[in-house]
Amino acid sequence: MKPGDLIAIAALSGPLEAERVPALERAVATLERMGFRVRRAPLLEPGRRHWWSSAPSAQIAEELNTLLRDPEVRAIIAHDGGQTVLGYLDLVDIEAVTADPKPILGYSDISLLHLVLYSRTGLVGFHADLATPGLGGAWQTVPAARRGEHEDLYSTLLTGTEAIGALPTRPSWECWRAGRAEGPLIGGVLNRIMRAQATRYALPLDWFDGAVLFWEELGGEASWVWSDLHVLRHCGILDRISGMVVGVPCRIGGLGSSDVSPTLPEIVLDVLGKRDIPVLGNVDFGHAGPNLPMPVGVRAALDAEQRTLSLLDPAVRPHATTGPVG
């Protein structure tokens, strides 16, 4: 991307509630301040909804495909997450993705879209902040210096041809198991990783060889997190990865709430067992926001003891090249 390029904000999952319009306006202003032009996709209309979604799955897919085919649109950011992407995974125009790859940004439900498009095309997906709750919400609650840091980071990630290097760290980052690892970042919301692997578009197991698995979770119970991690164990994923990065937990019930409730580190280490891989925890990505961008498929270096995470490759590259694209 270049300064002045067009970013489309689209309702790829949940609807836009009328009371959240001011947050969407702030997201638009943030993107414009970063130097981009902004277009709101037609389904991003206050009050429009179909059940828990912005529209029926086929309509959302049609709008996404229109944006993928539009050469003026150089990136797409989801307005919000939700419970919809599973309904249109098989309707995405894969030829449009490969013909004109462009960054898609978002987390939560959108992390499922990242994983499937990465599996099918090699597209680097940006597990990064959503427009309304992120750029227009969580970003506005932090000091101006941190907000500016995120604006610079996102702009560089979208427009730069050099690797970002070390992501900005926070005192909250924790070493849950020491060690170093280097490999492609693969991950998203924990339950969406599990669901992606249950579809015909699952990532081949050998794609996890040496990978740095990152995940976060919202809601549910501590026992659900434990169970979902065991699903990844039974799938064979945990036997293949070289490291793990865990986001800030958000509204998970029964997590360290009493002497008989485990903490998240205890759950992770219990499931990992004797697998001697580094684990860096409480990293600021996911529903707790603001999010550090975690580009799916980009090579990363992890040093859990030093509490560092570095992006070793650029997340975007000139369109004419081959291989994973973003």
Image: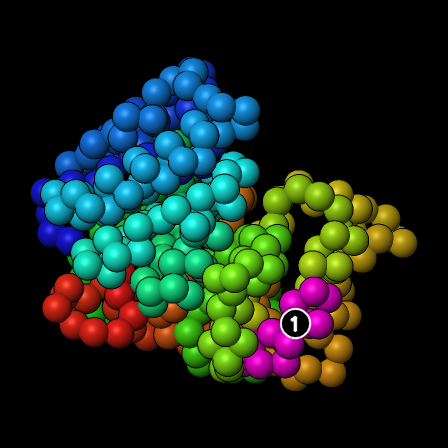
| Image location of residue 98, percent across then percent down | 24, 61
Where disc 1 sits, the SS reads helix
Q: Is residue 111 left or right of residue 10?
A: right
Q: Residues within 10 Å of mark 1 (few under 14, many from 20)?
A: some
| Above/below status of 48 relative to 272 | above
Residue found 34% across the figure and 26% down from its top:
44
Q: How is the image coloured?
A: rainbow
- In x, y percent, where is residue 20? 42, 21
Q: Quadrant of residue 59?
A: top left
Provide the residue span drawn in magenta. 230-243
Residue 317 in percent (x, y) is at 19, 66
Taking 163 as reference, is 227 above or below it?
Answer: above
Q: Amino acid at mark 1?
A: Cys
From where the camera sits, is residue 208 visible? no
Answer yes or no: is residue 96 visible: yes
The answer to which of 150 and 198 lies nearer the viewer is 198
Instruction: Give the mark count.
Output: 1
Q: Residue at x 45, y 35 (%)?
A: 57
Where is 261 relative to 51, above or below?
Answer: below
Q: Residue at x 75, y 59 (%)?
A: 227
Q: Is residue 234 magenta?
A: yes
Residue 165 place in picture, x, y as percent: 31, 70
Pointer 1 residue: 235
User: In front here: 123 or 312?
Assistant: 123
Question: Which of the two residues, 183 or 15, is positioned nearer the viewer here?
Answer: 15
Residue 136 sits in which quadrant? Answer: top left
Residue toward you, 170 or 234: 234
Q: For residue 31: magenta?
A: no
Q: Residue at x 44, y 49 (%)?
A: 89
Q: Farthest residue in the right direction?
A: 260
